């Protein structure tokens, strides 16, 4: 219960009795009980509304798989880096990379003394 052990709960109850007094304590306890009931009612209503909108898909959902506490960031990063590295090694082993040198032929060259085309609207 909120990470409070029995001794701490007793201290909190004693402090509440001292601060609030025995006259007001039952009144605040009733208000707290009403608040808890209202929160439970709202949570139940939200669950029912979600179930109506999503349907039976939510029942079949594996919630443990979506729990963020199960993920280890170091493991995720390590796997991602190793996967990329393994893919790169596999690609290199499959076929060697051939050098592709683009040679400009004489037909593509400008005649001597002619300037390259310049578009004044593009700049």
Image (cartoon, rainbow, N blue to C red):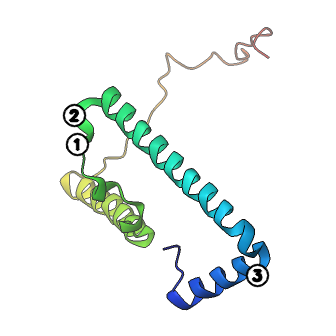
Q: Which residue is mark 3?
A: 18
**Disc ID at residue 78:** none
Question: In the image, is residue 107 above or below residue 53?
Answer: above
Q: Which residue carries the number 1 mark?
A: 59
Query: Which quadrant holds residue 56?
Result: top left
Say which of 114 and 53 sits in front.
53
Callout 2–callout 3 Cβ contact below 8 Å: no
Question: Residue pushed farthest top?
Answer: 121
SS state under label 3? helix
Residue at 46% from the left image edge and 49% from the top image edge: 40
- Circle 3 residues within 10 Å: few <14, some 14–19, many ≥20: few
In the rendered image, the vertical position of residue 59 relative to residue 2, given as above or below = above
Residue carrying label 2: 56
- Residue 49 in the image, given as x and y percentages of width and height: 39, 31
Looking at the image, residue 103 sits to the left or right of residue 85; the answer is right
User: Could you tell me how far apart the alpha carbons at marks 2 and 3 are, in whole angstroms?
Assistant: 51 Å
Tell me which label, 1 or 3, sits earlier in the chain.
3
Secondary element at tag 2: helix
- Occupied quadrant, residue 117: top right
The CA distance from mark 1 to mark 2 is: 5 Å
């Amino acid at each position: 219960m909120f990470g409070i052990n029995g001794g701490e709960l007793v201290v909190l109850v004693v402090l509440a009795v001292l601060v609030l007094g025995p006259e007001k304590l039952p009144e605040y306890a009733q208000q707290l009980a009403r608040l808890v009931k209202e929160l439970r009612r709202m949570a139940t209503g939200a669950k029912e509304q979600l179930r109506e909108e999503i349907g039976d898909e939510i029942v079949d959902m594996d919630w443990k798989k979506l729990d963020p506490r199960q993920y280890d960031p170091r493991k995720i990063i390590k796997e991602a880096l190793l996967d990329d590295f393994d893919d790169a090694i596999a690609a290199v082993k499959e076929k060697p990379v051939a050098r592709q040198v683009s040679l400009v032929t004489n037909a593509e060259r400008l005649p001597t003394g002619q300037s390259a085309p310049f578009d004044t609207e593009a700049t």
